[in-house]
Amino acid sequence: MERIICLAIGYVCGLLQSGYLVGKLHHIDIRKSGSGNAGSTNALRVMGWKAGLMTFAGDVLKCFAAVLIVRGLYHGSNCLALLMMYAGAGVTLGHNFPFYMKFKGGKGIAVMAALAVSNCFWHLPYSVLMFFITLAFFAVPVAVTRYISLGSLLAYAAFFIEMVVFGQLGWFGMEQAYLYELYILVFLLTALAWWRHRANIKRLLNGTENKFGSGKSKSKEG
């Protein structure tokens, strides 16, 4: 029951579509512009860096909100890290598949960034490495190739690996059975992110993916 509650809390928070709201401020329906994706990358390409940053910040904050609510409700639980991840999973589902937007939302990368940061506080100061490692797996590929999608995919893969490594180091203070459930959940979130980027992956392999800073795309990005 706790897991369902955490998923529900996350889903409700995830329904706040920052890209859609920022688009309305610019008199743009983000669902009908660029790739039609409500995430921060499409907002960046369609409306510029300020709108992209506002969208990213909003998507990060809604994940923080869900995690903090769950942390407050279940503080002291012997599987708190797992329940917080369920909240993050709910946010991801709400962000990716908002029912009131015909289930057309973002791709969950900003939510993953918030999860990486929220998991930095379990075993300070060493756990801060999770944030910087995840950031490096995003920033370095983007800086070298200018492919935001590539950095996003690698960052999510790195996040999954970090959760497994740090979990096995005992940083989350949970029994092994809960840890296995945590790993499966993060793996499913990673697989969902890669599936949501399947069109981007195809373009990366074909060499036709849009590069950061190359101008606003008129093509459908998937």
Image: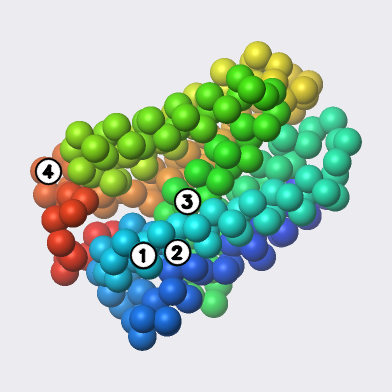
The numbered mark, 4 or 3, whose residue comes first in the sequence reads 3
- Residues 178 and 125: in front is 125
- Give the position of the C terminus as an image quadrant: bottom left
Q: Is residue 176 left or right of residue 14?
A: right
**Residue found farthest to the top:** 169
The numbered mark, 4 or 2, whose residue comes first in the sequence reads 2
The numbered mark, 3 or 1, whose residue comes first in the sequence reads 1
Please report contact status of discs 4 and 1: CB closer than 8 Å, yes or no.
no
**Residue found farthest to the bottom:** 27
Query: Residue at label 4?
Result: 206
Please report contact status of discs 4 and 2: CB closer than 8 Å, yes or no.
no
| Residue 202 on image: x %, y % | 21, 46
- Residues 202 and 128: in front is 128
Query: Residue at label 2?
Result: 54
CA separation in Å, label 3 and label 1: 15 Å
Q: Residue at x 50, y 58 (%)?
A: 57
The numbered mark, 4 or 1, whose residue comes first in the sequence reads 1
Query: Residue at label 3?
Result: 110
Residue 189, can we see it?
Answer: yes
Q: Is residue 8 above or below residue 16?
A: above
Q: Residue at x 78, y 36 (%)?
A: 80
Disc 4 marks which amino acid? Asn
| Residue 198 on image: x %, y % | 31, 48
In front of the other: label 4 or label 1? 1
Disc 3 marks which amino acid? Ala
Query: Residue at label 1?
Result: 50
